Image (tube, rainbow, N blue to C red):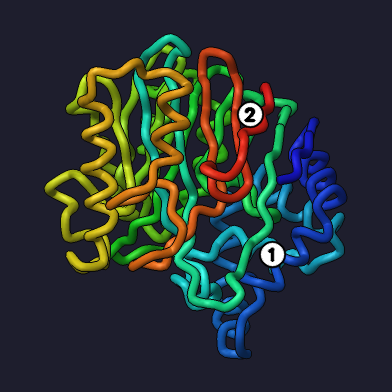
Amino acid sequence: MRVIECRGNPRQIGHTTGEELRQEIIEHVALVARPKDQNWRTQWQRRMPAIRATLREYLPDALTEMEAMADAANLPVDDIFMANHLHLWGHALDPEDEEGCSNIVFRSGPDGPLWGKNNDGHYRADPPVQKPVCVKKIFPEHGIPMALVVTCGSLCIGDGLNAEGVAIGQSSVGSVFDQSDRHPAIRLWNYLALQNSRSTGDFVRITSRVALRGKGFSMVCVDREGEACSVEAPCPLVQIRYPDIETGINCVNYYRLPQLADADRRTPEDKSNAVARGRFLDGVLREEQVFDLRRMKEVLRHHGAPSICRAGGKDQAFTKYSMIGMPKQNRLLFCDGQPCKSEYDEVVI
């Protein structure tokens, strides 16, 4: 997994990203951002003025960064916009790879608060489609430095850690609610929020500030003081779930709040594996264990029924990469592929 460093204003950050990751961005666009037929292009062009207006109103820096990235990567800017707005189409542009994942937070321990995540895909192609992923260390001219794990060409997919010790991780879920092109994309809004959050409380306040659009996500957030929560967002709604287990919190691919049980477009059968993973992680948090880095790696490498480190099986899900955030030390650990087969590298932000 490549690691790049970007500094400066949004245009400089976008230009550096486009130059450093040109080939990987082109590969990502070829996989997911180019419509499969002309109907998709026609729909996109019809909606683009409203989407661009929303970016200009709510996320002007993100708009500038995407334009600079497209220019440096020698791609049409519409392709970069598409790569950052895949939620508009569900999985129509990416039928071989439906995102899944498991997030868990330890609120305290010898290594301080910890966030761990395995990012999984449900592959239906042979061989599996693998979107290129990188770690970006970002030092904005105005805002908090951060390290993000992203698909190349995306500004943010909801996974990372900032220099104030705020870590976030997302799980893909769904939303039954109508949405508007006048609502900013939740993943881009997360990018803004992480640049401006010095605590979990800050992240919650910023995330809840406006109506958002997107597929619908469950997220965890933890800061260096151990304050933690899950943001459950069947867009445009955002609700906050606080830990009911003292030692931590987890989120997987379903909403845990009773009020949102039917807000995800998923049947009980679709959610059965996610529910099993959530119960397993609840059991981990109830253990009389030392909640340290060693234990976090054990959890992320767990195989069983259910597996957290996934390698096919009944639901044909595979862990694509893994990460651990250490808010007190400003360290982000990451590995490509299944963590049971790989050692973690790290960056410090």
The answer to whether residue 191 is left or right of residue 139 is: left
Q: Secondary structure at mark 1?
A: helix
Residue farthest to the left?
A: 258
Q: Amino acid at mark 2?
A: Met
Residue 96 place in picture, x, y as percent? 52, 74
The answer to whether residue 123 is left or right of residue 4 is: left
Q: Amino acid at mark 1?
A: His
Q: Secondary structure at mark 2?
A: strand
Q: Residue 229 sits in which quadrant?
A: top left
Which residue shows up at 70% across the image and 68% down it?
29
The answer to whether residue 215 is left or right of residue 119 is: left
Q: Relative to 271, does residue 44 appear above or below in the rendering?
A: below
Q: Relative to 227, does residue 19 appear above or below in the rendering?
A: below
Q: Earlier in the sequence, mark 2 or mark 1?
A: 1
Q: Nearer the viewer, residue 71 or 104?
A: 104
The answer to whether residue 31 is left or right of residue 92 is: right
Q: Relative to 301, does residue 71 appear above or below in the rendering?
A: below
Residue 168 place in picture, x, y as percent? 46, 34
Residue 12 place in picture, x, y as percent? 82, 40
Residue 59 visible in the displayed image? no
Residue 143 visible in the displayed image? yes
Q: Nearer the viewer, residue 138 or 116?
A: 116
Which residue shows up at 43% across the image and 28% down it?
296
Give the position of the C terminus as an image quadrant.
Answer: top right
Residue 104 place in picture, x, y as percent? 37, 34
Cβ atoms under marks 2 and 1 closer than 8 Å: no
Which residue shows up at 69% across the image and 64% down it?
28
* Label 1 packing within 10 angstroms: few (<14), some (14-19), many (20+): many
**Label 2: which residue?**
146
**Label 1: which residue?**
28
* Label 2 packing within 10 angstroms: few (<14), some (14-19), many (20+): many
